[in-house]
Image (cartoon, helix red, strand yellow):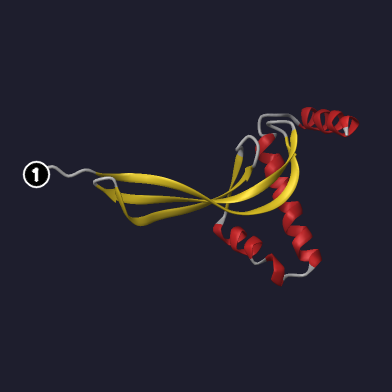
Amino acid sequence: MFIIFGWKKTTKPLESLLTTDCHRCHNRSKWNIRQETEWVSLFFIRLFPFKNKYRLACEICGDSVLLAEKTCQQIRNHQKHSQAKNQQVYNRLIQQVEDHQFAGMTQGQRQYYRGVKAQGN
């Protein structure tokens, strides 16, 4: 008997969330929430979803930051919150994106990059 099973990953864009600088592609771009689903498959047919992950991804270069499911739910229900609460969530997400993209840099390099970027705008 011959059985082929495995995992297949699908990605589905959910919504465009915010516009901020991408420090990888050096553009001001929209960042979208994407849902990645890993499926268990049998004979190349997806049977059931195994795991869901949510990512915040740059629309231009595709660089992405992993989001916690709780954070993603908060974001997707943002209409229910006050404007101040939404701004706090967006600021936290922008900080998370910058932390991801500046991961290998020292504090001095980060400040230099932000200064150069500010002069260019």
Quadrant showing the N terminus: top left
Between 21 and 104, the one lying in front of the other is: 21
Left or right: residue 61 compared with residue 90: left
Left or right: residue 44 compared with residue 71: left
Q: Residue at x 59, y 63 (%)?
A: 73
Instruction: Write down the quadrant of residue 87 in the picture.
Output: bottom right
Q: Eyeballing the image, is 24 above or below 73?
A: above
Q: Residue at x 67, y 46 (%)?
A: 31
Tell which residue pokes out farthest to the left in this image.
1
Q: Eyeballing the image, is 96 above or below 89?
A: above
Q: Eyeballing the image, is 111 above or below 48?
A: above
Left or right: residue 43 compared with residue 49: left
Between 38 and 95, the one lying in front of the other is: 38
Count of numbered circles on the image: 1
Left or right: residue 4 compared with residue 19: left
Between 89 and 36, the one lying in front of the other is: 36
Image location (x, y in percent) of residue 33: 60, 51
Tell which residue pokes out farthest to the right in this image.
119
Q: Eyeballing the image, is 70 above or below 58?
A: below
Image location (x, y in percent) of residue 42: 25, 49
Image location (x, y in percent) of residue 45: 29, 50
Q: Which residue is mark 1?
A: 1
Q: Residues within 10 Å of mark 1 (few under 14, many from 20)?
A: few
* Amino acid type indicated by mark 1: Met
Tell which residue pokes out farthest to the bottom in this image.
80
Quadrant showing the C terminus: top right
Q: Secondary structure at mark 1?
A: loop
Image location (x, y in percent) of residue 59: 64, 41
Q: Residue at x 63, y 34 (%)?
A: 61
